[in-house]
Amino acid sequence: MDVLADALGSFRLTAGVFVTARMTPPWSVISPPSVDVARVTTPPPGPVSGFHVIVEGRCFVRAGGVTIAAQAGDCVVISAGESHVLCSDTTLTPEPMAPYFAPSARDGIPHVEHGEGKDAAALVCGFLRGDARLGPLVRSLPPILCVRGARHVELVWPEPSGLVTRCPAGDDAGGWLAAVRRRTVEEASAGRRGSSVMVTRLVEILFVEVLRRYIEAQPAGGAAWISAVRDDVVARALGRLHEAPGRSWTVEGLAREVGASRSVLAARFRARVGCAPMEYLTRHRIYLAKRLLATGDLSLAAVAERAGYASAEAFSRAFHRAAGLAPGAWRRLPPDARRSAEREGGKPQGV
């Protein structure tokens, strides 16, 4: 199993546009945390990232203590969704975004029009919302990621040594990613009915590809979650556990499956993922059980079997230890309460 694909596929990633803007210099605004923006529509079930599509002109984006220059055609992701600054000049003192809002709207989305004249920057601003399982990966990312395209598509992010660009091997210069990025900008500038929906779907695709390319560009000793996926032994072990969580796994048996000694697997798994293989398996089984309890009407015995437990009694004991309440009580919680619990626990660290 492709563990990265499994993880990305489980995120249930969604996007939303919250404002379009045309800003004429001089201007500098503080964008609120993306989680606050997303809360206006629905309580976010987990980490929320921000994004900005630069339709025309240019601007600067500052987050996490670093700044990049963005220009027309760029798609900028604020990975941790923290409050950040957008401006025409980095020497300006930023102001809250709220006073810039005007009553007009395009495609049902609030629109900001600041000033008149040349060199205006046109932007589409939104958020990407996932669930708790996205957290470890988001925490592994730099504060800003930018998909930019000229003759080919580049992935840009700041590092302590300065601004770095990466084009992983196999980059499809002028190919599908360039077409998606170009189409995103076209839809963002069109102002047609349904454009905001098109932009959000295209941004979801861009974000998944950004994650994939960033992971591919990392050295073997990179951040823990990324390192886990790129470590052959750990990736194979994670794949086996994801393929068959219900098997009666032991560390010895898992080590044989992936062609490593027990000690090598245990050491590398803990170093990359942050916990022992069997602890990870237990957390993953509880995560699967929570999904089944929340989305279906299976009996507790059926949930226990699918989650990999030999009996409903054993499952109930394990679930209570992990979640703090019995499976039936957890199932009866209102959706908001379950989402809150997931933010506190979620899927095992590293997935």
Image (cartoon, rainbow, N blue to C red):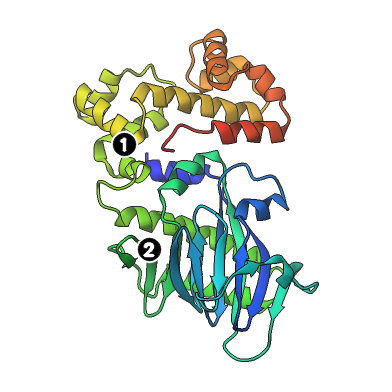
Q: Position of residue 229 (x, y in %)?
A: 33, 42
Determine which of the numbered discs, if any, sits on residue 228 in the image: none
Q: Which residue is mark 1?
A: 272
328 left or right of 270 in image? right
Residue 96, located in which quarter of the rendered image?
Answer: bottom right
135 vs 351, nearest the viewer: 135
Amino acid on which the number 2 mark rests in the picture = Pro
Q: Quadrant of the C terminus?
A: top left
* Element at label 2: strand
11 vs 46, nearest the viewer: 46
Amino acid on which the number 1 mark rests in the picture = Arg
The residue under the point 29% across, 45% down is 230
The residue under the point 30% across, 53% down is 218
* Element at label 1: helix
Mark 2 or mark 1, earlier in chain: 2
Q: Is residue 61 above or below residue 312?
A: below
Q: Which residue is mark 2?
A: 158
Q: Can residue 295 be seen in this snapshot? A: no
Q: Quadrant of the N terminus?
A: top left
Q: Is residue 233 above or below residue 120?
A: above
Residue 293, located in which quarter of the rendered image?
Answer: top right
The residue under the point 57% across, 77% down is 55
In 3D space, how far apart are the residues under numbered discs 2 and 1 (Cα atoms)?
A: 24 Å
Q: Can residue 186 be seen in this snapshot? A: yes
